[in-house]
Amino acid sequence: MKATTEILRLPLRDPFRIARDEHPSLATTVIVELELDGLRGMGEAFPVAYYGETPQTVEQVVPYLARGLGDLGPPPAEREAALAWLEQASGWMDAALGNNGAAKCGLDTALHDICAQRLGLPLHEFLGVAEPLPPTDFSLGLDEPLAVAQRASRAAHFPALKIKVGGAQDLATLRAVREVYDGALRVDANTGWQPDEAMALLPDLEALGVEFIEQPFPAHWHAQLRWLQERSPLPIVADESAVTADDLELIVDVVAGVNVKLAKCGGVGPALRMLRRARELGFRTLLGCMVETSLGVRAAVAIGGLAEWLDLDGNLLLAEDPFTGLELAGDCRWRQPSAPGVGLRRQN
């Protein structure tokens, strides 16, 4: 098993700032390629400093884990056995090294790509996820209210917009967006609010037609999140508080929903299992992404039918996507590629 990594620094169409700001004009991601049994698989590892990862840690972790995965032997050529092998590989990575969800995601996706290619199946068919996909929303970063409203007007064909909040002009921004857009609004504070601030905003958020509030407080403020959810007519959705499936039991009766992301939890297989477990526990489910290329988004699209809401728009935020083969239909639902594996091509 041979793994290689390539760091890509990709300009964005518009600045994309969040309350926990990192790089508002540039997305830095890592493409992972894996060679196994004559097949080449691809995956994406989008590192986020908040979770302790950088492009450099990914470059170190991916070869280390790939060497250990080689000891598992080649994946079986039968579908059910291959799925079991992939779950074993994911478990081995978690046992070998804690955290590092993005690096694991790149390898896990590449392994799924190889297994699906071997069977001649598109990734979603290999996984057996047949439920129809919800439409994706479109995300708008923190900025001056007028700038956010102008971007909202350009994205008015999306059935929902996710507005990044956590700044000094949150309410003014949402009111400006509502003047030019009549679809559903979702707000994401990325841990940027305080309890009294969130409580004061609730009546206005409800009046503006906000659908849910994502991660208003820091990740481990479970008591404060529970306090707000008990008083909120809107669902509170955990993102930074729900990194892997192990976090779900800790936030039962704390929030109404969870945001599952492949780059947080470790890839396609872990995200699929996390979504299923979240549904068993009664959570509403959002499937999200980082500012990834079509490669990372396509991996999530393969399990999108398991989620109630989709926030899979990372590739749409890029000035230029290095991959082709993933298409958005007129109703803002992603079309599953029909080629075996992830089914995408690298542009020259």
Image (cartoon, rainbow, N blue to C red):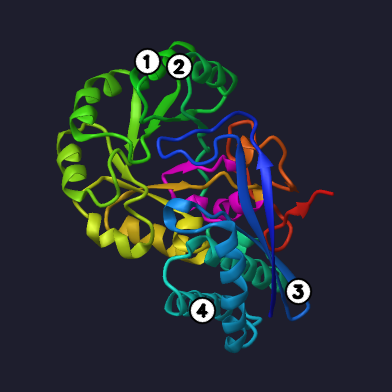
Looking at numbered disc 4 in the image, what kind of residue is underneath it? Answer: Ala
Dot 3 or dot 1: first in sequence order is 3
Q: Mark 2: which amino acid? A: Pro
Instruction: Kindly indicate whether the residue at mark 2 contacts the one at mark 1 (C-beta within 8 angstroms).
Output: yes
Q: Are marks 3 and 2 in contact (CB under 8 Å)?
A: no
Q: Earlier in the sequence, mark 2 or mark 4?
A: 4
The kind of residue tagged 1 is Ala
> Relative to 101, is 232 on the left or the right?
left
Viewer-nearest residue: 150 or 19: 19
68 relative position to 231: left or right: right
Picture residue at 30% right of the left edge, 60% below the top: 247
Residue shown at 46% from the left, 38% from the top: 21
Residue 306 appears in the picture as rendered: no
Please tell me which of labels 4 and 1 falls first in the chain. 4
**Pick the front one: 136 or 194:** 194
Q: Residue at x 77, y 54 (%)?
A: 345
The local secondary structure at tag 4 comes to helix
Q: Which residues are magenta?
A: 295-314
Distance of mark 3 from mark 1, alpha carbons?
Answer: 52 Å
Specify the quadrant of the image occupied by residue 329.
Answer: top right
* Cα distance between the residues tagged 4 and 1: 50 Å
- The 10 Å Cα crowd at callout 3, few under 14, some 14 to 19, many 20 or more, is few
CA–CA distance in space, label 1 to label 2 = 6 Å
Which residue extends farthest right? 348
Which tag, 3 or 2, sits closer to the chain's start?
3
Label 2: how many residues lie within 10 Å, few (<14), some (14-19) or many (20+)?
A: some
x, y percentage for residue 284? 33, 47
Alpha carbons under labels 3 and 2: distance apart: 49 Å
Question: Pointer 2: what residue?
Answer: 145
Q: Nearer the viewer, mark 2 or mark 4?
A: 2
Question: Disc 2 on helix, strand or loop?
Answer: helix
